[in-house]
Image (cartoon, helix red, strand yellow):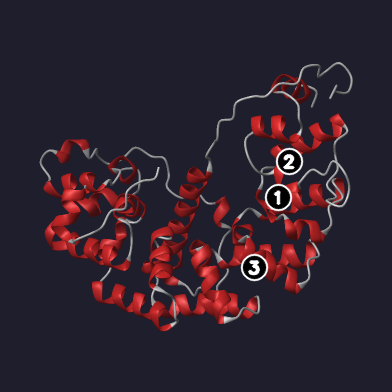
Amino acid sequence: MRSILRSIVKIRIPARSGPSLPLQLCTKVATVPTTPQHNALQRYEDDLQNEFHQILREERQSVLDPVADPMSLEVFPNTRPAFNFAAYVNKSPTLQQLVSLGVELHKLEKRKGIAQFVLGLDFDRDMRNHIRFLADVGVPAESLGEFLTKNPLIFKEDLGDLETRVNYLQSKRFLPEEIARIVTKNPFWLMLNTKRIDRRLGYFQKTFALEGSEVRALSTKQPRLITYNLEHVRKNTFTVQEEMGFEKEEVKQLLLSKPRIWMIKTEALQYRFEYLHRRMKLSHAELLQTPDLLLTRDVRIKQRHGFLKFLGKVQYDPKKELYIPLKSLAEGTDEEFVAEVAKSNMECYNRFLKTL
């Protein structure tokens, strides 16, 4: 991949840096090894697919028009591809170049019309300048393959239009590193013209009473939210403010700290809040201090809170002894939680889970 990129543009590629327990259910305390788990990438890919479908749907309508809930849509039907790229790779220099860049062709095959579109392109004529542009904007070399896998339709965009969209961000005082993150983390951002992006940024600024610096911070932290389905954003805003009872300033605080709250299913958000607030008796202030709880799977919260309750260790008040940080319900692996927070062992925890 590096040789391909060097032939397009000079790119610097950074080096990689590498007590006794209640009842008889739990009788032995032991330290257990920890194994980090990473599920964020799959959620990230699923969300990007939703956005891709959303953008295609919005081509013929205003961004302010209501649209269907994207979470209920099937984005890329899992149908049989029209053909297999494998039959063309050995004969197509363009496909070979894409493979060298890290593009996952098998994912493109599953998208209706995309394979035919890519096969109709010539690398030197239709792709080289776009890839150079992305590199110049700041998309890291190691992220180009993922970017193009997510959004191969970038090659249908006029380079002049792409430059105008980047110039717009510069005119709004976005720093180069912020623009690089926006484009990298949301491969579909550049598909929207400046008027649509301006209206989106204006919507968030007006709705949540944001300062200019806060709009830039929000866009940089979660660029996918800016191009997300506005009807879904409105629904979650209503839920957070009217149904969950957060004040306007608190809603703003939540948005800036955890913007992904506005991208999850409304029903899941409502259910999670009900459990945290009604069942666990957590106040709005406590949720504001630990907003990750609103993004944590229900089953994880229930299991960990239930286990602490079983052990008689539910104590979330930092002013009292034996304080258990609320963030421990959301962070780390089960092994880490059991050993370091609950001070128990996995055998005990697994036996407890069987009683649920």
Label 1 neighbour load within 10 Å: few <14, some 14-19, many 20+: many
Rendered image quadrant of residue 343? top right
> Which image quarter holds the C terminus?
top right
Circle 1: element type = helix
Residue pointed to by mark 3: 234
- Write the residue at 88% across / 23% down: 22
Residue 278 as seen in the image, left or right of residue 292? right
Whichever of callouts 2 and 1 sits on the residue coming sooner in the sequence is 1
Residue pointed to by mark 1: 293
Whichever of callouts 3 and 2 sits on the residue coming sooner in the sequence is 3
Residue pointed to by mark 2: 301
In space, the residues marked 1 and 3 are separated at their CA atoms by 21 Å
Label 3 neighbour load within 10 Å: few <14, some 14-19, many 20+: some
Which mark lies nearer to you, 1 or 3?
A: 1
Circle 2: element type = helix
| Label at residue 285 | none
Q: Is residue 21 above or below residue 168?
A: above
- Write the residue at 17% across / 56% down: 6
Q: From where the camera sits, is residue 227 visible?
A: no
Give the residue type that dot 2 points to.
Ile
Q: Is residue 286 above or below residue 101?
A: below
Most foreground residue, 277 or 309: 309
- Write the residue at 75% across / 67% down: 241
Most foreground residue, 201 or 283: 283
Which mark lies nearer to you, 3 or 2?
A: 2
Q: Which residue lies furthest to the bottom in this view?
A: 171
Q: Are marks 2 and 1 in contact (CB under 8 Å)?
A: yes
